[in-house]
Amino acid sequence: MATLQISSSLFRSFFLMLCLFVIPSLSSDSDPLQDFCVGDLKASPSINGFPCKSAVSASDFFYSGLGGPLDTSNPNGVTVAPANVLTFPGLNTLGISMNNVELAPGGVNPPHLHPRATEVGTIIEGSVFVGFLTTNNTLFSKVLNAGEVFVIPRGLVHFQWNVGQVKARMITAFNSQLPGAVVLPSTLFGSNPEIPNAVLTRAFRTDVTTVQNLKSKFAG
């Protein structure tokens, strides 16, 4: 019985140590060690953001860049207005950011992923088909209307498509000050330097003419 009690005690101690050291590491950005650290964007970023500005004012903690309407007259019919550390330095080291996303009727936010953050969003207006893909190629999707919420697990490919007759708008939030975005079409066919045609023709089981045509659409 004494051995069992000692073993149980050791297990609880180990579990608490595991919680203290492992669980914090699951967050996207490291926890800050000060009240705030408004980013100095003139300096180079370090592991967890930019160095702190020496002079801080109230304006550093407020941002008006998420307003609209946005111009969605582009090939995808979507425009994103970000509030991340690059546009809103007050977010530096705080591990959060937001986007205003607007889609024209029929507009698509093309398949993409955020390597550094989980995404949660709410539809402000319109009807949006939201979907994400798991690592075993399962698609989870639903048409959402104003007031409904979605979540995209970190690093998974996802997209949004305006299936309504009017402009749609979403506000999205991330657990990273700079979640990053890998937009698959432009990444694969608009990279610099280019991905060799032989790789893309084999990967997509197509021909060089088709690959070159796709590259021409994303060049520059």
Image (tube, rainbow, N blue to C red):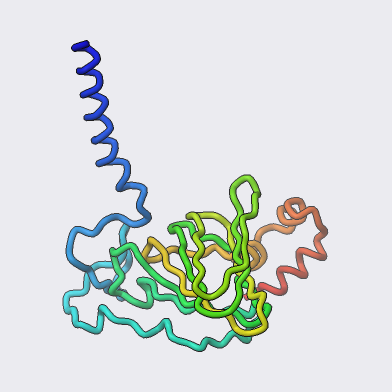
Query: Horizontal placement of 82 versus 41: left or right?
Result: right
Query: Horizontal placement of 119 versus 209: left or right?
Result: left
Q: In the picture, residue 183 is in which quadrant?
A: bottom right
Residue name at image x 45 percent, y 74 percent: 99
Q: In the picture, residue 79 is in which quadrant?
A: bottom right
Residue name at image x 33 percent, y 47 percent: 25
Query: Horizontal placement of 31 versus 115: left or right?
Result: left
Residue 33 locus on image (x, y percent): 19, 58
Determine whether 47 is above or below 4 in the image.
below
Quarter of the picture holding the N terminus:
top left
Determine whether 101 is above or below 149 in the image.
below
Q: Nearer the viewer, residue 8 or 45?
A: 8
Quarter of the picture holding the C terminus:
bottom right
Determine whether 6 is above or below 117 in the image.
above
Residue name at image x 56 percent, y 88 percent: 71
Note whether residue 94 is visible. yes
Q: Nearer the viewer, residue 180 or 150?
A: 150
Residue name at image x 39 percent, y 75 percent: 83
Note whether residue 193 is visible. no
Q: Nearer the viewer, residue 62 or 206?
A: 62
Count of numbered badges drawn on the protein:
0
Residue 173 locus on image (x, y percent): 42, 67
Q: Nearer the viewer, residue 195 or 128?
A: 128
Q: In the picture, residue 17 is in which quadrant?
A: top left
